[in-house]
Structure formats: structure tokens, C-alpha cells
Amino acid sequence: MSHTRTRMTFAELPADYQSLVNEVYLPRTIHDDVEYGNVREVLDVLTVNAERLNRDQQDFLDTLATLVEEYDRAQGPLCKSRLGGLNALKYLLKENKMSGSDLGRLLGHRTLGSAILRGQRPLTVAHILKLAERFKVDPSLFLDKKRSQSLSSRRIARG
């Protein structure tokens, strides 16, 4: 399945369920990250405007949310194919109700957290190990694919 046409606005959403299904997205099991992205795009529009939804739009939102939950459950809560290291960190901070300052304090310097979250400072190996311990996750979660492959090849070369 290909990506949806463009970013949708609330004004473009049909008001009735049948039109939502026919014109926006046919609710079905999500099979890959492209379909996941398409559904998330629609969900974003619906959730941002949650207080304005009519009953059919709310039912459509609930249906799509269920499909996303099922896909997320099947992929695991932190599927590395969708999250890079920084996005995984942001997700964990949000889930743990932590701020950039909290991250900085955890890593040893209050302002460091904000710099990391803005992409101005990379995570070091020491940071990654501390984060993995704090959040009880595999340290490789915080590595972007390119960096992870680079570290793996160095380990292999050292033998």
C-alpha cells in the first residue's frame, strides 16, 4: 500500500462513517509500516480535533486506534524499525512523564538533556547504558540503524 495523498485537514474529513471508509481509509488489519503511517496520519487529524468529532467520526477514530494498538502489540512497544534512537528516547520520556531537564539530571547535567533531544548532542555509550538501565530496555534501542551496524562491524573486526 502506498502513502496517503497529502496531509489531511479536519475540514476535509467526511461526517459519516461510510464516507470515512470509502474516502479516507478502509479499516483493515495493518500489515506494514507504510499502512501504519497512513493510519497514524488519519488518527493524528482525528485526535487533534477530538472535541469536534461527531459520533461517526468518533467511531472511526476508535476503530483505527484499535487497529494501531493491535499492530503495535504485534510489533512490540518499541519497534526499532519505526523508531530511531532519539525517537525511542522521546517515546520513553513521554511514557515516563519525564522532561528534558529530567533526562539531563539522569545523565549528569541538567542542560544536556535538552541538547540531546534537539539533536545538538549525540548519545554517548555511557548515556546509552545509563538509559537502558533506567528504562529496562536493550541498549541497542537507542542506536540508530547506521550507528548500530557501525558498532557491530567494529566488534566483529576486534574479534
Image: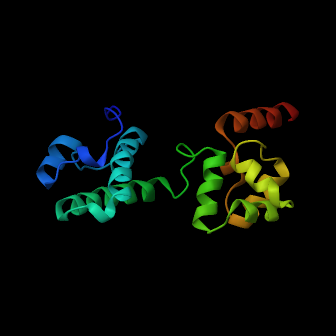
Residue lying at 59% horizontally and 62% vertically, measured from the top left: 94
Q: Is residue 77 left or right of residue 9?
A: right
User: Which residue is most to the bottom?
Assistant: 97
- How many marks the image carries: the answer is 0
Q: Is residue 121 left or right of residue 50?
A: right
| Residue 110 appears in the rendering | yes
Q: How far from the left and from the top, in percent, is residue 130? A: 80, 60
Q: Is residue 91 above or below residue 39?
A: below
Q: Nearer the viewer, residue 80 or 38?
A: 38
Here the colouring is rainbow
Q: Is residue 81 above or below residue 53?
A: above
Residue lying at 21% horizontally and 46% vertically, measured from the top left: 26
Q: How far from the left and from the top, in percent, is residue 122? A: 77, 43
Q: Is residue 112 left or right of residue 86?
A: right
Tell me the quadrant of the picture where the C terminus can be found. top right
| Residue 70 appears in the rendering | no
Q: Nearer the viewer, residue 10 or 92?
A: 10
Residue lying at 67% horizontally and 40% vertically, measured from the top left: 144
Tell me the quadrant of the picture where the N terminus can be found. top left
Q: How far from the left and from the top, in percent, is residue 23? A: 18, 41
Residue lying at 52% horizontally and 58% vertically, measured from the top left: 77
Q: How far from the left and from the top, in percent, is residue 31? A: 35, 44
Q: Nearer the viewer, residue 144 or 109?
A: 109
Q: Is residue 118 left or right of residue 16?
A: right
